[in-house]
Amino acid sequence: MNVQIILAGIGGQGILFSSKVFSELGLKMGLDVMGSETHGMSQRGGSVIAHLKLGKFQSPLIRKGAADILYSFEENETYRTLHFLKSGGICFVNLESADQFNKSIMKFLKEKEITFRAYDATGAASKIGSIRSANIALIGYSAGTGLVPFKYEDLRSVLELVSRKKNLKINLKVLNAGFQEGKLLKT
Amino acid sequence: MRKTGQEEVRVLLGNVAIARGIVEAGCHVVTSYPGTPSSEIVPAVVEFKNELGLDTYIEWSANEKVAFDNALAASLTGKRAAVAMKQVGLNVASDSLMSSAYTGVIGGLVIISCDDPGPHSSQTEQDSRFFAMFAKVPAYDPSTPQEAKEMVKEAFELSETFEIPVLLRPTIRVSHAKQSVRLSPLKVLDRPANFEKNPERWAATPKYRLVLHKRLNETLQKIRERFENDTKWNYETGKSRGASLGIITCSVSFVSLMDILEELNLKSAINVLKIGTPYPLPQKRIADFIKRQKRVLIIEETDSVIESQIIDKSKVLGRLTGHIPLEGELDPDGIHNILADVLRELGITNLEKITDSKLDKLVEKLKLQVRKPTLCAGCPERAAFFAIKKALPKAIYASDIGCYTLGLNLKAVDTVLDMGAGITLASGFYQAYHQDKKDIAIVATMGDSTFYHSGTASLLNAVYNNARFILVILDNEITAMTGMQPTPGIGITADGSEGRKIPIKELIKGCGVKWIKTIDPYDIKKLVKLLKEARTYTQRKDGGIAVIIARHPCIIRYPEVCEDNPVKVEITDDCDGCNYCIDYFECPALYINEEKNLVEIDRMFCVDCGVCIDACPKGAIIPIEKQNKARL
Ligand code: SF4
Ligand code: SF4
């Protein structure tokens, strides 16, 4: 299996943590991992983007129109990074409702047969008491929808591996909340 | 982490893979000054040291030259040593680099200089491979984290065999790439320190330097021969006779190119020669490759190091012929387009270029604001800049390298040149105006880590030569920008053990400054007052340089400072949407609610520092408790 994932958002939203989650997940799935991250100046509130390629790849960067999945933790960063998605790709956005998304771009996504899912990950995470875990809520949600090749159990054990001790409980709770919401949508 | 049989595979950041290579090579001493994209190397060595129970000596040095010399000395005692820095750090260390190429080394000495094409986080795009050429030391140029790890190990061997420092040049896309990397066992080298005196060599006089130079040239020739025969780092992919184009490439461009050729099914139409040892260049291999191709394209980042060394360029296309951009990063789409242009020009095939799609045009219409990096919500440096701007709105603001470069957004930074130039440019400005008998306000800003790096020579020079300006030391008790490395001011060393604390105030005093005040910049009103006093001191007959140490811990490194003492704020109806706080204070937690045209607080980012209370001219930002009390 080859999967190319883009993680997009702004500094402070846990992009690097999410990237760690997917790299460990890749290893767990028996895939090679390749990717690229933003560190340094741009982490100070600027746009942050991580590329992750699971499977057989040589280069760490994802090309325009080549990503299978885009996780965007912020609406505007979605517009900025959509060009990475291939036709038929999937896009998960941290957004209260899909109605908020730009109409003409939404139309374009339909033409390209890109699946679009908006989920209020920030809302879900803050309900559980950790607004900063929105990234995990969105990832859990994606697994719930069944649209991505990632298993809930695997994500759980990866979180156990990479979370800071004091965040682990909340992270697992948030993952589960997202997952359940995603599942609802599936049925 | 995955273990298959004996072999362990871990997903490692390029810099962590480099650290692993250092450890696997049995290296004894590691020194560094932090700088993106090199900063993760030392912390990773510390982690391996702890994990594996090693007794590696690791140091965050005061600056890159200091780091270089400390590593070199270790090598002279026979130990293995590595020194890591970002590419502009090598400028600082270059004095030592140039000289040590002549005198050579005993134990392996590997210099890791991380380049930043783009540039993403640097003041230049300089290519460290040119520095290797300039200094006449061999260079390795890895394409992936795995390769970087292996190259580090070979670099140590090469360095010891030929008694020469060796440079490893990862670019940011290698340093910050992630890859599942196969780990190897560690080498254990028992090397008790044993410096053998040889003043003729280690303290060579100019006359003997000529001899050393000759020897260096002979050594380079031998290394070149070794690189000619090397097939591990220099190799061809595909040897199609009928190929219509040959490409010589290196670093991350090589892997990008390979993925592109695969995707476009061009592998049989194009022969590729990958070069992992750009200096000294394996000339025969290159010439032989070129001979077998009709035309050859050179794709290398960031500058034309391989291309300019090629002797017969008659078949060569590259940067020197205008086929490759002269600046910026070569991303995969960029390489695709270069390839498309060249293939069309040579009449080989018509490859469609990647252009702005319909989507790009739609997104362009949204006029999204570029998200500028900003100082973090609650950053003490924002408070300091706000006060500086308020107290001395017309001053010249000479600043420096660090998070606080972002004081640009508050319009309180006029110059950023290099490490330490906050003070030197301030004194230079003073002298230029003073010569014309003009008295102007000048405020230099510099972080604590930058001050330790290169502040003292600049400051004592300014004092000695009677310059007058205000220096604000933004003392957040950490090297924040590059990922929170300790400074000599907090007295903790790289591996967490205790070091001797060197208070910044004493250093400043030692430089001859007579007026030094320490303040918490969170108290904007007090700081404004103090700045005005400082200005008066610089104008007094018996005055001079005034230094304010604005000390408040970095909010990211020490979040507990606000968490334990939160000042929750609220915006009252007095807010009339004047936007002053957004434009002049620009805390990322404050934003305009466009519908209501009023400012609101984004709780996701707000850290309850309470500093904005002093930033609103209408008094509309107030602490919540106070409001509750008022209601009672
Ligand atoms: S990391 Fe620390 S010093 Fe840097 S901008 Fe953020 S709060 Fe300020
Ligand atoms: S209290 Fe004010 S200045 Fe501090 S983080 Fe919140 S909004 Fe920003």
Image (spheres, coloured by chain):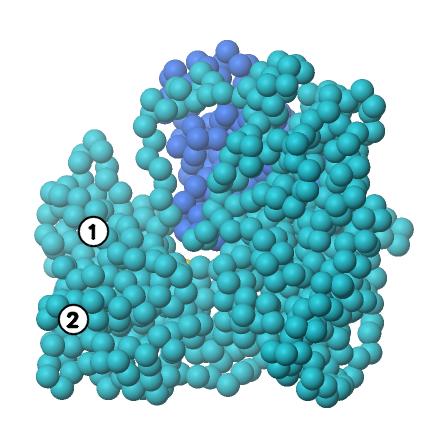
Chain colours: A blue, B cyan
Find disc 1 in the rendering and name its residue. B584
Binning the other alpha carbons within 10 Å of mark 2 as few (below 14), some (14 to 19) or many (20 upward) gives few
What residue sits 10% from the left and 81% below the top? B540
Q: Nearer the viewer, residue A69 or B71?
A: B71
Q: Nearer the viewer, residue B56 or B69?
A: B69
Quadrant location of residue A51? top right
Task: Give the alpha-carbon distance from disc 2 to disc 1, as whole Å.
Answer: 33 Å
Q: How many marks?
A: 2
- Mark 2 chain: B
The amino acid at mark 1 is Tyr
Image coordinates for residue A84, horizontal then vertical, percent: 54, 27
The disc, 2 or 1, on the residue closer to the chain's N-terminal end is 2
Image coordinates for residue B223, horizontal then vertical, percent: 78, 58
Compared with A46, B334 (above or below) is above
Q: Is residue B504 visible?
A: yes
What residue sits 10% from the left and 52% below the top? B618
Binning the other alpha carbons within 10 Å of mark 1 as few (below 14), some (14 to 19) or many (20 upward) gives some
Instruction: Describe residue B22's horizontal placement relative to residue A121 as left or right.
Output: right
Say which element carries label 1.
helix
Compared with B380, B540 (above or below) is below
- Mark 1 chain: B
Compared with B42, B586 (above or below) is above
Q: Nearer the viewer, residue B566 or B552?
A: B552
Quadrant location of residue A148? top right
Q: Is residue B623 visible?
A: no
Find disc 2 in the rendering and name its residue. B435
Q: Which of label 2 and label 1 is nearer to you?
A: 2
Image coordinates for residue B213, horizontal then vertical, percent: 67, 69
